[in-house]
Amino acid sequence: MKLSLVELAAVTPGTDKPKALQEAVDAARQAEDLGYHRIWYAEHHDTGGLASQAPEILIALAAHTTGRIRVGSGAVLLNHYSPYKVAETFLQLEALAPGRIDLGLGRATAGPLADLALRRDRGTPSADDFDQQIHEVLAHLHRHFPADHAFARLDPTAGIPTRPDVWILGSSGNSARTAGELGLGYAFAGFINPDGATQALGRHRASFQPTPYGSAGHRAMLAVSAVVADTDAEAQRLNWSRRALLARMARTGTAPRVPTVDEAARDLTQAEKDAPTVITDGRWPRQLAGSPATVRDQIEQMTKATGVEEVLIQDCIADPEARAHSRALLAQALGVAPDRLSAAS
């Protein structure tokens, strides 16, 4: 099994956005040392508690400080941008770190006001043309426009022999078939919609066909939120910070930083604290939390049910030492940590 990480650049207690961004870059080096296969950077707008608004910048910095791990976006929110600009940007990143760049494409709202601010043309209604945008990105990356197309003479690939690896990210399953038919990898956000994971990933597998745009074989990832600690009780307690952050964002639309565990304990109801962090009565939780053995067992059940061979971990832990420890414990539990780390544990 491959283990990967999606980094939020969360603003934790005692830090600010500059510190959070530096920690996000440092996370790439830590993940590489722990045996993680890839690290992706998220894109969020108009939120005080998450500092990653421009994953492209973090990708460049992280790629520069690492040598093996794949680095990419989880995801570029394509609904806000020009496909040509996205293709150019990721070709430039690929030129800087050949063979290690992933272009993860997704779509999401940042809220009505931020969505409007991100748009260049505010005089016409926004269009839901995500599939068309994906095709256009691929056409720029592979120069597959028809000869009579206005963009056919553009060549952003000039002098760049390799291409970023393109993935589609989704949480509803709507883009699973598109990804499969285009031969692209697909990552499903199980931390948003755990109930939809099996169906969406099955749809991707059923529709998959090799194309020049992707690999010869089927590839898919399941993205989950996970907190690992030495005991189940401690992991569940650490997970309260994420639950309180999401609750605050739901109430006010934003949050200045990730709450401490003590703050979260005051914010959350007992029912919220006690919400399941393991599969219960066949239902998958939005967040996994537990000891290494507990979380390994849960992930193995999920990967067996979906047929994926890679999990993408999202975590949001207020204490940076606990966050680093969680990532190390998970790498050891899933058997991806180098021998020197496994022996030390």
Image (cartoon, grey):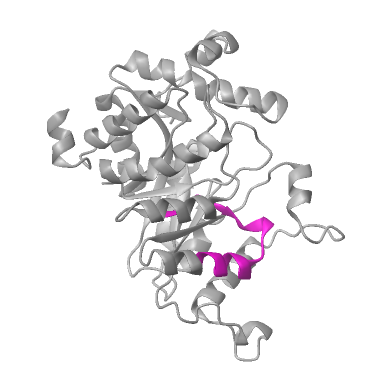
Quarter of the image containing the C terminus?
Answer: top left
Point out residue 134 in the picture as x, y percentages from the top left corner.
Answer: 58, 66
Residue 334 lies left or right of residue 122; in this view the side is left
Residue drawn at (63%, 61%), measured in percent from left and top? 130
Q: Is residue 163 left or right of residue 272?
A: left
Residue placed most toward the observer, 199 or 149: 149
Q: Position of residue 120 (x, y in %)?
A: 77, 60
Extreme residue toward the right, this view: 123
Residue at 45% x, 55% y is 186
Q: In the displayed structure, would residue 296 be above or below residue 269?
A: below
Position in image of residue 219 (x %, y %): 36, 58
Residue 20 lies in magenta, yes or no? Answer: no
The structure residue drawn at horizontal position 66% and vertical position 60%, both measured from the top left corner, is 81
The quarter of the picture where residue 147 lies is bottom right
**Who is closer to the viewer here, 42 or 94?**
94
The magenta stretch is 71-90
